[in-house]
Image (cartoon, rainbow, N blue to C red):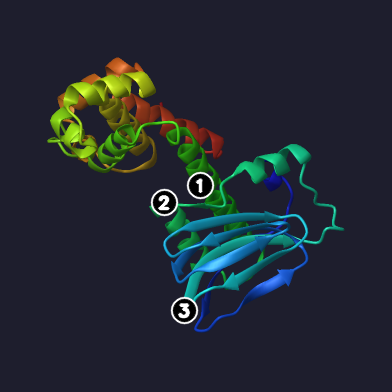
Amino acid sequence: MAVFLSNHDFELGVARSSKHGGIGPIHRSHLGMWIMLRGNLLAKVDDRRFKVAKGRAAFLYAHHVHELQYTSNEVEYIWCGSSWDTASEFTVPRETIEQLASIPNVLKPSKLLYKLLRLGVAIQHRRGLAAQRVRNTIGESAFNEYFYLANIAEEESAMPKPVIKSKTYMQENYSTLNCKLNDIADAAALSPQHLTKLFKQYMQCTPVKYLWQLRGEKAIHLLKYSNLNISEITTECGFKDPYHFSRYIRRHYGYSPRDIRKSHWESNSISNGQTSVM
């Protein structure tokens, strides 16, 4: 989003309280996000209000004022935010404000979102321009992860629960060789035939095809961004053996796993000003 085009800084931290209290009201424009680790709170943002319970992630964009009121004695949350004066040169385009307003204020956090916030907190007290750049990168990544989760939630809101359950099951078990159609259907509490029919209707493919697409995408990511060898990636992504893995990747991506890794690593070496070895 265009909201990240300005050079404003992100800060991260952990807030704790052992009694009813809160923060604010703060009369500044603010972009904020947090994950509730303990307790509950009520957020007041301009003319809107929403509750956030333990285990949920929350997001706010305040144009003028925001306030957090703790509604339980014990409160703890990990947060990321950026504030700026309304009189500053930084302005949010109207179309971006409309996008931000459409994003759900509360949703279920991902493990990645939690890790990003924890990572940012770990370096919050480092000083210097380089440290701030790292915090800004982490902060922007955390917000983009939230936006991604919101987009997924919107897409899944139109899907039947069995389809969502089966997708979740495959995402959590794709590395298991025993992840078969019957197992996926059992997780969705449907017959294999009924689940396949629903999957074709809402995902335009069968559950088994979705599973192999998921395995292929995970494998491509590991080829590009990990040092795992071919045998390790084969096991990690649920392929039967290296031959089966190589055949699938070549058929669906046009190149062998080694060629994909070599091409990606060499292109990175060139972009970093290093000499590639052909």
Q: Nearer the viewer, residue 262 or 70?
A: 70
Residue, x 46% and y 40% (percent of image)? 153
Residue 258 visible in the displayed image: yes
Res. 111 mark: none
Distance Cα–Cα, label 1 vs label 3: 27 Å
Residue 13 placement: quadrant:
bottom right
Q: Is residue 85 left or right of residue 23?
A: right
Res. 74 mark: 3
Residue type pointed to by label 3: Glu
Q: Position of residue 93 (x, y in %)?
A: 77, 41
Element at badge 3? loop
Name the mark nearer the viewer: 2 or 3.
3
Res. 145 mark: 1
Crowding around mark 1 (Cα neighbors within 10 Å: few <14, some 14 to 19, many 20+) is some
Q: Nearer the viewer, residue 65 or 221?
A: 65
Res. 110 mark: 2
Residue type pointed to by label 1: Glu
Q: Earlier in the sequence, mark 2 or mark 1?
A: 2
Element at badge 1? helix
Element at badge 2? loop
Q: Is there CB contact under 8 Å for labels 2 and 1?
A: yes
Residue type pointed to by label 2: Ser
Residue, x 39% and y 40% (percent of image)? 225
Residue, x 52% and y 48% (percent of image)? 146
Q: Is there CB contact under 8 Å for labels 2 and 3?
A: no
Q: Position of residue 33 (x, y in %)?
A: 57, 58
Distance Cα–Cα, label 2 vs label 3: 23 Å
